[in-house]
Amino acid sequence: KFTDWEDLPGGGRRYHLEVKGRHGWKARYIKEVDAKEETIRFFQEVYDDKGNLIEIHEKYPVNKGHIKT
């Protein structure tokens, strides 16, 4: 599902996928993995129609819920 990534120090990667909403908003899903491709962090960033980050929802390793920025 994740089509784009960047390499991280230590051999891990940060994958991301952007999804556009109906009203100009977008969500960016980010998955960080270690060198063994095991998930170490997964979260969602929500941007408004002007491209401003308005909310982060960290889902893994602990679901912290939606945090307004």
Image: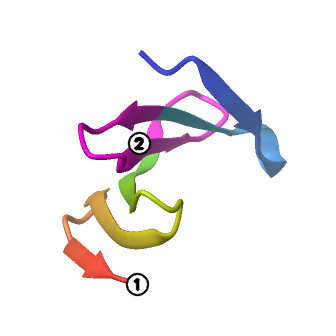
Q: Looking at the picture, which amino acid does disc 2 mark?
A: Tyr
Query: For the residue labelled by badge 1, is the local secondary structure a helix, a strand or a loop?
Result: loop
Residues at discs 2 and 1 in contact (Cβ within 8 Å)? no
Give the class, few, some or many, for how many residues have Cα within 10 Å of label 1's Cα (few <14, many ≥20).
few
Q: Is residue 41 above or below residue 63?
A: above
Q: Residue at x 37, y 33 (%)?
A: 19
Give the camera-side residue of 52 and 44: 52
Q: Is residue 1 left or right of residue 14?
A: left
Give the camera-side residue of 7 and 24: 24
Q: How many marks?
A: 2
> According to the image, label 2 marks what residue?
29
Q: Is residue 3 left or right of residue 56?
A: right
Whole-percent x, y for residue 6 in the image: 75, 36
Q: Residue at x 55, y 28 (%)?
A: 37
Instruction: Report the span colored magenta.
Output: 18-39
> According to the image, label 1 marks what residue?
69
Disc nearest the viewer among 2 and 1 = 1
Q: Residue furthest bottom?
A: 69
Query: For the residue labelled by badge 2, is the local secondary structure a helix, a strand or a loop?
Result: strand
Whole-percent x, y for residue 8 in the image: 77, 46
